Image (cartoon, coloured by chain):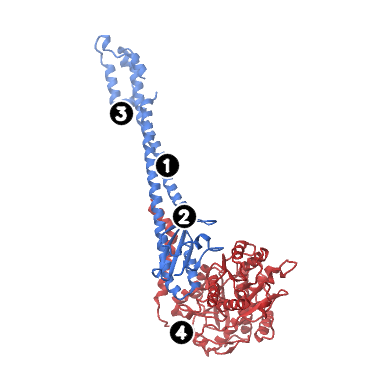
Amino acid sequence: MHSSCAAALLAPWARWAGAALAAGAGVSSGAARAAAPGRQAPGAAGGEIVLGTSAAFTGPSRGLGNELYRGAMAYFREVNDSGGVNGRRIALKLYDDGYQPDPCVQNTLKLMLEDQVFLLFGYVGTPTVTRVLPMLKKFQEERIYMFFPFTGAQPQREPPYGDFAFNLRASYRQETAGLVENFLATGRRRIAVFYQADAYGRSGWAGVRATLENHGETIAGEATYQRGSRFTGTMRAQVEILQRAAPDAVICVGAYAACAAFARDAIDLGLRVPIANLSFVGSENLVNLLSEGRDDPETYTRWLVNSQVVPSYEDESVPAVREYRELLARHDPQIPERFLDDPYNPLPQSFVSLEGFVNAKLMCEIFRRFDEEPTRAGLEEAVFSIRDFDLGIGEQVSFGPDRRQGLQRVYYTVVEDGRFVPLTDWNALPA
Amino acid sequence: MKVHKLFQRMRFGIFALFGLIVLSTSLLCIRTVDTELSAEYAANSQSIAKTIADASVDILLNRNLATLQSLIDQFLEVQGIRYIYITDETGEFLAHTFVPGIPEAILESDPFQAEPVERSLPGMGDFLEVSSPILAGVAGTVHLGMDLDLVALKIQRAIGQQVYLISILLVVGILASIWLVNLVARPLAALLAYAVETARHPPEERALVVANEKLLERDDEVGQLARLILYMSRTRPPSGPEALPDPGAARSAA
């Protein structure tokens, strides 16, 4: 009798282990790439190139998936209205994963095996992407690449999965390094980290730790939160942990709802130091949560310092920004009805949608590099042909076998009058 | 007429015997389930920790902490595992699953602890922490906390199910034994009634006492006794009052 009880107790572990072993077996099979040149590429047959997306269209982080999609669609619609890329329209096959790894894995399987998309595009998040990467290796004979995920984590930039992804944005390592360097340069040596308890948070934490280590410093204090936390929740326990470390600055590695809750509780509890956020946070949603319904909207936002991986969407001196604003206003892409359990108010402009826009712009440029029908086998060559390409954002984009990240620059912003403006003087941050 | 005294003792004996069986079986079951399931949980925790340790080597050597975190997050989905943390060869925490932060008790513990240890973490519960070295310990150590409260709950549930089954068997056994005793008692009572009725009559009238036909037709000992009484009642008793049975004594026996 008790052996059956034990079997029942251990059944979840056994199931999990079975799945893990199956995945591991797939990953370690290491079959050589052998895509047949000239074979008609799935997802690019006929007059359409189908890209597959799994992103957060619902849940507390839906603002990220929604805005990234809107920015990309603004460009794709313009291209499609103008006859497509070499006569081929761009279509997106969308699935919602709610920023959760397991649904993302299931969605990716569907995109690859059932929908037969040409490539994966516009994924959102580190915990989701890191779980999908082994699948790309498993199906490496199919040469399914992931393009421009909305994450700056290292796993898709390094072996063993770096060969299966192309990144456009700067990495979290670069963002955190810049933040730490600037804080240290202005005498803020005690740097604490508030981060999401997952691969994304760990990626940012590792970036902060590495840079501090280079300067002979260590992380002054750290606190975590559960992915999916909402603004209505409390972060007081986390604030109290960090208060004990008496930091000079806090770097947050999270999504907007949780980071806004942390900033609110930190200021309310007297932890009044610069609170930095990475580009993934969703800056506008962060500020909206912290400002809405307040007599003094800057009560909390004056402490924010946000790193960005695209220039300010307010800066119309940047050609790509002008184009982005014009096309976003013209096409005003809406989120598909099936994802709208709750009403969603799109942002007029945002860093996230601008990133989606430049992602789409570069994607189309890569498709233009094909003389004939795009093939998966030819994708890598097409990407590597991008050398010193001007996307119109003030930084040349280059790719190569040893360079799978197009952009390197990080921008730093603060909030003034409810808008993000470039941070010009780190010494002027509130103390 | 009922045959009380004889069967009351028998029923008591049956209750006592069944009670003893249930008690001893339950105690044995509790001890076995508790000991073996606890050991099995500990062994499985240890093997999970070793699995993580083995899978972490390349990741750690590549300093890919996001992937390391992703790995331990997946293992956290296994039922009963409440926390995992990985320390490097210097004892620094490289990845963990604690929210809102690493508990003081763990920060102050020995990061190279190899033996299983029971921990009580304020606000979290009681845990059995097992560890497994990564690359023989030169790359770090994996620590894994199994929720002892959950394990205890599972064990209690398993024991409860077994005791529940044994209790059902006890009740069924007792009811069955009562039914079986009654099966014997009913013809015995009828036989006794027949014997008493026969004894109440004077010897010359005993042959007129009507015997229960069903009793006489039985092919068991009760039927044989009934037929013997009938035979004796129809057989002329030896002369002399001392040879006759005492009807008063027969009545009091009834």
- Tell me the colour chain B is drawn in: blue
Q: Amino acid at mark 4?
A: Arg
Three-letter amino acid code of the residue under disc 3:
Arg
Residue B80: percent from left, percent from top: 47, 58
Image position, residue B204 (x, y; %):
30, 12
Q: Nearer the viewer, mark 4 or mark 1?
A: 1
Chain-order first, disc 3 or disc 1: 1
Q: Let me know if marks 2 and 3 both belong to one chain.
A: yes
In this rendering, is residue B144 above or below B207?
A: below
Residue B218, numbered circle: 3
Q: Quadrant of the C terminus of chain A?
A: bottom right
Dots 4 and 2 on the same chain: no
Q: Which chain is red?
A: A
Q: Is residue A20 left or right of residue A290?
A: left
**Which element is circle 4 on?**
loop
Q: Would you name the residue on which mark 1 appears?
A: B167
Q: Residue at x 44, y 66 (%)?
A: B142
Which chain hosts label 1?
A: B
Q: CA distance from mark 2 to mark 1?
A: 28 Å
> Considering only order in the chain, which callout, 3 or 2, is on the residue closer to the N terminus?
2
- Element class at badge 2: helix
Q: Which residue in the structure is indicated by mark 4?
A: A39
